[in-house]
Amino acid sequence: MSPSGEQHDVATIYAHYKAMYNASNVGASTSASAAPPAPQNAPSNVARRPHRLPEDALEILREFYRTKTTRPSAGAKRELLARIHQIPGTEWYSINSINSWFNGRRMADLRKEEKKDGTASILWPSLDKAKIDKLQVLHRQRPPNIPLSKLVQTWARALGSDVEHVQAWIDYNDPSEEASELVDRKPALHLPTPEATASPEPGCMRNTQSPTVSTPQAPPVLQPFSTMPPAVKRQPFSPVQPFFVPSQTQSPVSQSPVPQQVPQGRVATPQAPQASASPAPPPPCTPLGHAITQPRPDLKIVTTEVAPTAPVLAPASQPVAPAQVMQQEIASALQSSTASLLPWEMTFTSYTDADIVFEPMEKMCRDIIRKARGGFYASLGLDPASVSASFEASSDATDVDDGEDMDTSA
């Protein structure tokens, strides 16, 4: 064929394909304009949406890659595909998909190993990439009943590498192997024994007070020369029979000689002076530092020379009994009274001396009775009418006794 004929053929082919190209463009534009608009709610790119295996199917592939081999055979691939197809929604998965997954996983591991090339050339230079792949398979499939030290020697001989390099690779990639053999994982049979310290036992702690009190208790009775305010024992209240208890440094009233009348015809025998009561031992202290007191039939008040401070009262949130309120009132009255000015040794020579001594106590009792009659304790259950009636009867009886005493003295 001449060159002119070849050019004619090329021109003819060019014109033919150009006409086909123009016709296809015109038809595509016409069909696009004539086609109805697609519905708005139709899903877009349904065919292009990538498929993804469920997590259960991926776990099948990962387990085979870790425990079996990174290059499965054709029969192993068919078995894997059959197991994956048992999971719903994986019908689209094929042998080509399995090949792609294993290739991608090997490439990812290769990139990780390339990052460790600097370390590998220093720590295990006799192990190349192929030997490391075989060593990984041996390490994953090692028998549990053979010590790791013997396995390392066997693996080194099979791979043609040094034992030190194989052991270094195992230590670097799985450092928990040797540690798990040395750590004793048996649980402790008992708690650790506490060491001996110089701290005192709780029972030996004396005179210590806690900043908080769990339950309201009666105010403690303090010893003389104390820095705490005078306290009152929790005992029945008797306003007409006050009784003072002298402190340890005072001389009791009973030591003062009192003249006695001896009837005619009898010989007076000398009597030994009454021995003063020995001071009671200090009461035991509780862990809270309060004295333990036993109730007695009479009200006993202990006074000191130290300036009193605010009394210890029960918490406001707890209900207070009338008897306890009276005790608190007595303690408050003692602060304002002149009890601290009383002489330490008292000798009664007449009724006037007794009136002088008991005047502060009578004043305190009158204040309490006046408050009770005025309804000060009504909120605590103490009726003013009953208080007035009881004390009027008591005062009448006292007046009768005073009259009889006056007649007798006359």
Image (cartoon, rainbow, N blue to C red):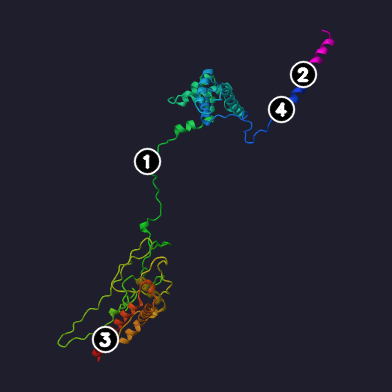
Of residues 254 and 70, the one drawn nearer to the viewer in this rendering: 70
Quarter of the picture holding the N terminus: top right
**Residue 31 image label:** 4
User: How far apart are the alpha carbons under marks 3 and 4?
Assistant: 135 Å
Q: Is residue 210 above or below residue 56?
A: below
Mark toward the viewer: 2 or 4: 4
User: How far apart are the alpha carbons under marks 3 and 2?
Assistant: 150 Å
Residue wearing tag 3: 400
403 to the left or right of 57: left
Contact check, label 1 and label 2, Cβ < 8 Å: no
Amino acid marked by disc 4? Ser
Q: How packed is label 2: few (under 14 Cα within 10 Å), some, or many (20 or more)?
A: few
Helix, strand or loop for disc 4: helix
Q: Give the extent of the magenta segment.
A: 1-19
Q: Is residue 10 magenta?
A: yes
The tag earlier along the polypeptide, 2 or 4, is 2
User: How far apart are the alpha carbons under marks 1 and 3?
Assistant: 83 Å
Residue wearing tag 1: 189
User: How far apart are the alpha carbons under marks 1 and 2?
Assistant: 92 Å
Amino acid marked by disc 1? Leu
- Image-quadrant location for residue 278: bottom left
Q: Is residue 354 magenta?
A: no
- Image-quadrant location for residue 375: bottom left
Q: How packed is label 3: few (under 14 Cα within 10 Å), some, or many (20 or more)?
A: few
Contact check, label 1 and label 3, Cβ < 8 Å: no
User: How far apart are the alpha carbons under marks 1 and 4?
Assistant: 86 Å
Helix, strand or loop for disc 3: helix
The tag earlier along the polypeptide, 3 or 2, is 2
The tag earlier along the polypeptide, 1 or 2, is 2
Residue 54 visible in image: yes
